[in-house]
């Protein structure tokens, strides 16, 4: 994987890769260090407890948050497949026909009729999948709804309700053990100066067994429409549930206020701010350097694509209408526009080059992609040297992506934790984590 591939991945704010970089590599260690530094202003013992709790919380939560939804969905997809359905059939195909009727250019019925005569094993399998869903729509919707519920509720319950209780119980038991040791030894031993207190396996396992003995019941109904949310959207939903969990499991109201402040700030900085920073940086680059950098840097460095621009051999859909866009991607799957649209996740082709009839094509998003694609080509043609223009655009885009990651990470890993402890100081009069302070 090249450096451009890596930068391209972390620059996609619709994927989990930017979150992985910020959360695991930058945010977690910074939050742990800041928590220790702030708590040391009051007490070394509290600082040790805060450091241990923060380390457990940050890394275990990150692992569940980043991996829990994809892993749960993987098992859910296997279950759906065993039930005879292909989980790749998009329910929006029903909505298209319900909204536009006979004028719909894609849909369950439309796609079946359009692709059914194509002699391809892959296509025929896709048609069979569509027919199966069409004939059992209600059952398929329920399965996808359950998949969504499992993928969001299970990780949220573990992160927001179970993990904090385990973490708090461990702190109580460690403190209790220390108090017992003081009585037995009849003196006051020096507090550990290390950041991490060793785990008492027996204590942790005893509490874990108690938690496992409790039954967790999930209730409520979810509509089938949410089954098409992206992983990043589901992570945002689980983050909201995590906020509720952390506030409700707080050891006192002051800790609840702190958790609410921290979690709400984290949600905004993770899911809202990076999108606007990216747009702002790209607009600034366009204004300063007269370069359109709204495309993926991998497109900008594609030599065959640049050569095709130089030779004036780039084909594009006639317009952004559904008819023109769909006709183009169906008739010209090898065109640069079609290939890059597939890489961008806007369309999906089967191995034999036929568009996957089970997938829904978002015409509005595909049209927007076409506009940006066309703008880049036009700007490149106006430049004196197309190759130099493309290199310049790629470097600027990569710089914008890295700047976005840097700014977002600074806000999440530096500014938010410091502001959280200033909020704690303002509301409690102390820099110590409110849940660790023993009230006399």
Image (spheres, rainbow, N blue to C red):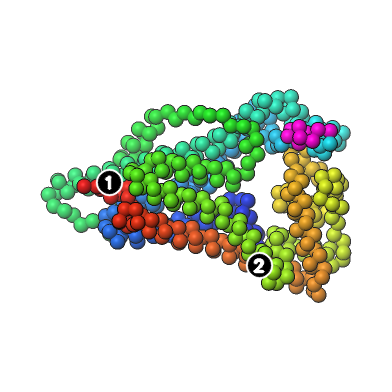
Q: Residue at x 76, y 32 (%)?
A: 98
Q: Residue at x 82, y 45 (%)?
A: 322
Q: Residue at x 50, y 43 (%)?
A: 240
Q: Which residue is mark 1?
A: 174
Separation of marks 2 and 1 at Cα, in angstroms:
53 Å
Q: Residue 200: x, y in percent?
A: 30, 44
| Mark 2 in CB contact with mark 1 (< 8 angstroms) | no
Badge 1 crowding class, 10 Å Cα cut-off, few under 14, some 14 to 19, many 20 or more, is some
Task: Decide which of 236, 387 is in the foreground and name it.
Answer: 236
Q: Residue 91: x, y in percent?
A: 70, 34
Q: Which residue is mark 2?
A: 284
Q: Residue at x 75, y 53 (%)?
A: 368
Residue 385 part of the magenta-drawn span = no
Q: Residue 124: x, y in percent?
A: 80, 33
Height in image: 103 above or below 27? above
Height in image: 115 above or below 430? above
User: Which portion, as a residue range, is magenta?
Assistant: 94-102
Task: Decide which of 192, 104 is in the foreground and name it.
Answer: 104
Choose mark 2 or mark 1, whichever is in front.
2
> Would you say the magenta stretch is mainly helix, strand or loop?
helix
Tell me: 417 left or right of 302.
left
Q: Secondary structure at mark 1?
A: helix
Placement of the N terminus among the 4 image quadrants: bottom right
Tell me: 351 left or right of 215.
right
Q: Secondary structure at mark 2?
A: helix
């Amino acid at each position: 994987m090249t450096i451009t591939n890596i930068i391209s991945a972390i620059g996609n704010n619709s994927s989990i890769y930017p979150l992985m970089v910020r959360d695991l590599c930058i945010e977690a260690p910074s939050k742990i260090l800041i928590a220790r530094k702030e708590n040391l202003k009051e007490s070394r013992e509290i600082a040790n407890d805060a450091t241990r709790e923060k380390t457990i919380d940050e890394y275990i939560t990150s692992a569940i948050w980043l991996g829990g939804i994809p892993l749960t969905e993987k098992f859910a997809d296997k279950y759906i497949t065993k039930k005879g359905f292909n989980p790749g059939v998009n329910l929006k195909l029903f909505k298209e026909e319900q909204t536009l009727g006979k004028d719909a250019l894609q849909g369950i019925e439309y796609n079946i009729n359009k692709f059914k005569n194509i002699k391809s094993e892959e296509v025929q399998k896709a048609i069979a999948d569509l027919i199966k869903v069409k004939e059992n729509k209600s059952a398929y919707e329920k399965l996808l709804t359950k998949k969504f519920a499992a993928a969001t509720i299970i990780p949220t319950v573990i992160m927001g309700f179970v993990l904090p209780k385990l973490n708090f119980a461990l702190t109580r038991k460690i403190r209790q053990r220390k108090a017992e040791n003081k009585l037995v030894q009849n003196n006051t031993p020096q507090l550990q100066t290390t950041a991490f207190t060793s785990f008492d396996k027996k204590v942790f396992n005893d509490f874990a067994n108690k938690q496992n003995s409790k039954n967790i019941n999930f209730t409520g109904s979810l509509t089938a429409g949410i089954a098409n949310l992206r992983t990043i959207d589901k992570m945002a939903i689980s983050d909201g549930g995590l906020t509720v969990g952390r506030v409700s499991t707080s050891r006192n109201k002051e800790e609840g206020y702190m958790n609410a402040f921290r979690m709400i700030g984290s949600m905004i900085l993770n899911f809202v701010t990076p999108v606007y920073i990216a747009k702002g940086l790209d607009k600034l680059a366009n204004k300063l350097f007269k370069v359109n950098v709204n495309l993926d840097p991998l497109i900008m460095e594609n030599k065959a694509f640049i050569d095709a621009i130089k030779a004036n051999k780039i084909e594009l859909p006639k317009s952004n209408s559904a008819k023109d866009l769909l006709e183009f991607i169906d008739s010209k799957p090898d065109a640069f526009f079609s290939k890059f649209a597939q890489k961008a996740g806007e369309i999906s082709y089967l191995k034999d080059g036929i568009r996957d009839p089970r997938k829904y094509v978002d015409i509005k998003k595909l049209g927007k992609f076409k506009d940006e694609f066309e703008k880049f080509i036009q700007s490149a043609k106006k430049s004196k040297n197309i190759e130099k223009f493309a290199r310049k655009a790629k470097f600027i885009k990569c710089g914008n992506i890295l700047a976005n990651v840097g700014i977002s990470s600074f806000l999440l890993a530096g500014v938010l934790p410091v502001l959280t402890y200033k909020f704690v100081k303002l509301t409690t009069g102390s820099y110590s984590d409110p849940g660790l302070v023993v009230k006399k």
